Amino acid sequence: MSMLCKYKEEFIHWDVSSEMLHFDFYEQRLGPNATLHFYEIAHMPNPLATLFMNEFNLVETCSDVNSSVDTYISRMRELERGGVSMDGIGLEGHFTIANPSLMRAILDKLATLGLPIWLIQVDISYTLGQEAQVSKQGRNQDSKLGRAKYKYKKVYENQN
């Protein structure tokens, strides 16, 4: 809480819940409503701050059952039913080879929630397995990701 109070004028966006679809560390130790309580605490010192839920493997792959777009939306709605005012969608993108079609479909579905979508962390690794295998497709990923970003420019601009 002291960090929230100390930096309330400097940080207007808080990544309150990070990677909680994959890990339940706090719920196991503090009870089933721990994440809900974190949002309540984060909102107290600065009610105008934008609060995010952040998760990885949402836009990278559709094979991670822990972080499907439906699971993410379900968790957001669960927190909202508990009284959390969710202000934004935070996504991590740790790509080996980006799939722009999958990204667009997921971003389109998340955009229906009407919340700002932020890419909190983005990186592209050209290392596949143990060997570095940079292909033409891999070299083109940076430009494909950039083009996908501009398609969603309004989502990014609606942050304030």
Image (spheres, rainbow, N blue to C red):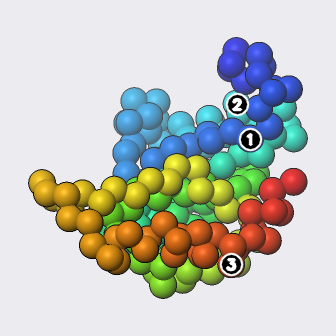
Image quarter hosting the C terminus: bottom right
Could you give the CA–CA distance between mark 3 and mark 1, rounded to whole angstroms?
Answer: 23 Å
Rendered image: mark on residue 41 = 2
Could you give the CA–CA distance between mark 3 and mark 2, rounded to whole angstroms?
Answer: 35 Å
Could you give the CA–CA distance between mark 2 and mark 1, rounded to whole angstroms?
Answer: 14 Å
Residue at image location 34% in from the left, 70% down from the top: 138
Mark 3 lies on residue: 151
Give the amino acid type for the residue marked by disc 3 in the picture: Lys
Crowdedness of circle 1 by 10 Å Cα count: few (<14), some, many (20+)? some
Query: As drawn, is 56 to the left or to the right of 35?
Result: left
| Residue 47 percent location from the top left of the image | 85, 37
Using the rendered view, name the quadrant where residue 7 is placed: top right
Rendered image: mark on residue 61 = none
Q: Nearer the viewer, mark 3 or mark 2?
A: 3
Sequence-wise, which precedes: disc 2 or disc 1?
A: 1
Crowdedness of circle 3 by 10 Å Cα count: few (<14), some, many (20+)? few
Residue at image location 38% in from the left, 69% down from the top: 139
Q: Is residue 103 above or below residue 95?
A: below
Sequence-wise, which precedes: disc 3 or disc 1?
A: 1
| Residue 116 percent location from the top left of the image | 74, 61
Tag 1 secondary structure:
strand
Q: Is residue 81 above or below residue 4?
A: below
| Residue 108 percent location from the top left of the image | 63, 80
Give the amino acid type for the residue marked by disc 2 in the picture: Ile
